[in-house]
Amino acid sequence: MRSGLWLLSVRHLQHNKLQTGILGLCIALSVFLPVTTHILTSRYDDDLTARARSSPLVLGTPGNETDLTLCALYFRQSKLEPVPFGQVKTLRDTGFGVAVPVNVRHTAQRHPIVGVSAEYYEERGLTPARGTLPLMLGDCLLGAHVAKTLGIDAGGHLFSDPTDVYDIARPPTLKMHVSGVLPETRTPDDDAVFVDIGTCWILEGAAHGHQDAEKLTGNKVLGRREGTVALSPAVKEYQEVSEKNLGSFHVHGDEAKLPLSAVLVFPKDDKSATLLKARTNLKSEFRIVVPMQVIEELMAVVFKVKTLLDTFAAFLATSTGAMLLLQVLLSMRLRAREMLTLERIGCSPGTVGQLYACEIVLVVLGGVALAGIGVATVTWLLPDLVRTF
């Protein structure tokens, strides 16, 4: 008899396809929304806090702390005033920890070019899957996603993006040699192009290489005076660093004043971190922020939005439940003659109730299954939120 009840339930639902489909979609939506919100928010929170936890302190210029944190940790270009390179030496001289310069002011194929020192790879635990770390000026190390997207491997070449195609005074694009490729880490490192901080000076136009000025003649020399040679704009700068011209690259101006986006600081212990924050924030024009605190404030806003969505989902679930109940009541009235026929052929009143229960269970299971497919599809197709942050 029970198999007959299920068969009758299925036949009735198939006969009323539109009604069944609407109920199933409403149930699926009321399940899909809170489950998806919870999964994505939890994953977002875990990934963001993991990145922030691995970066204890960030030094930058006063302003938007969120902007500074996103720049130093997630390689988003910042509108804050740059930090002079000399601050790295100042932090290192304190002996409180490791200071890593970070320059995120240029791109290559729309991927951020991140200038760092060798300490960055050590602190992050990054070792190339293929090739080596940048060993000389002009070398670059590709994140796993960059290498896959561009189809470039160790030994290849990558050009930097022009800073201003209409300004001939700006430095030209630089042809960089790909020294290695990082393994996938599921962090913003996957979408970055890492270079030595000296390569950033070339991209900034603060360093360049050209022919030996003492050997130039003709219209390439504007004048000579006391060992100084004034060169004409006709002298072309090298657009690629090689073993042959490496020695000709030099920095113009004071290196301590060259711009950085931020400085990552990895203190030796909690005491060193506290002292470093206090001395810097009270006695200098720069500011040290704690990325974990910034991310927690950011996630507090996200969770407020999640609460709003959860409230909406609860209202939707209540409405769906009321609609399902109304549908059952209307169905009982419309199917009164059908149920009377079942009673006359020997079905008990309890069997009629079981028939309605079977139909409700089938609709609910169908809605939940549809919601499960939707959740799986979204979590699979949606790109990594941290990498797109």
Image (cartoon, rainbow, N blue to C red):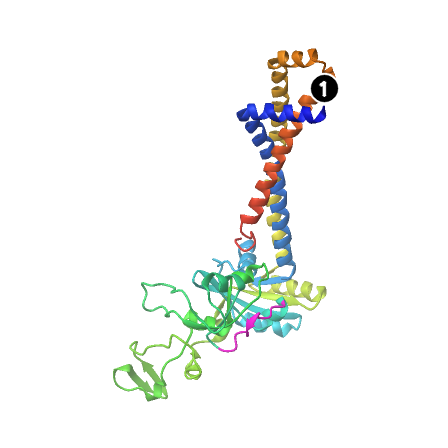
Residue 148 position within the rendered picture, expressed as x and y whole percent measured from the top left: 50, 62
Quarter that holds the N terminus = top right
Q: At 57% from the left edge and 41% from the top edge, which residue is drawn?
A: 374
Residue 294 lies in the magenta-colored region: no
- Say which quarter of the image contains residue 345: top right
| Residue assigned mark 1 | 351
Q: How many marks?
A: 1
- Say which quarter of the image contains residue 274: bottom right
Name the residue nearer the viewer: 340 or 240.
340
Q: Is residue 18 visible?
A: yes
Residue 130 lies in the magenta-colored region: yes
Residue 237 position within the rendered picture, expressed as x and y whole percent measured from the top left: 36, 77
Name the residue nearer the viewer: 178 or 112.
178
- Please state if 39 lies on the left or on the right of 107 as rendered: right
Q: Is residue 309 visible?
A: no
- Say which quarter of the image contains residue 315: top right
Q: Which residues are magenta?
A: 125-136
Q: At 40% from the left edge and 64% from the top edge, which residue is drawn?
A: 161
Q: At 59% from the left edge and 49% from the top edge, which residue is drawn?
A: 298
Q: Amino acid at mark 1?
A: Thr
Main secondary structure type of the part rendered in magenta: loop
Q: Dot 1 lies on which element?
A: helix
Residue 101 position within the rendered picture, expressed as x and y whole percent measured from the top left: 55, 69
- Please state if 262 lies on the left or on the right of 341 as rendered: left
Name the residue nearer the viewer: 129 or 63.
129
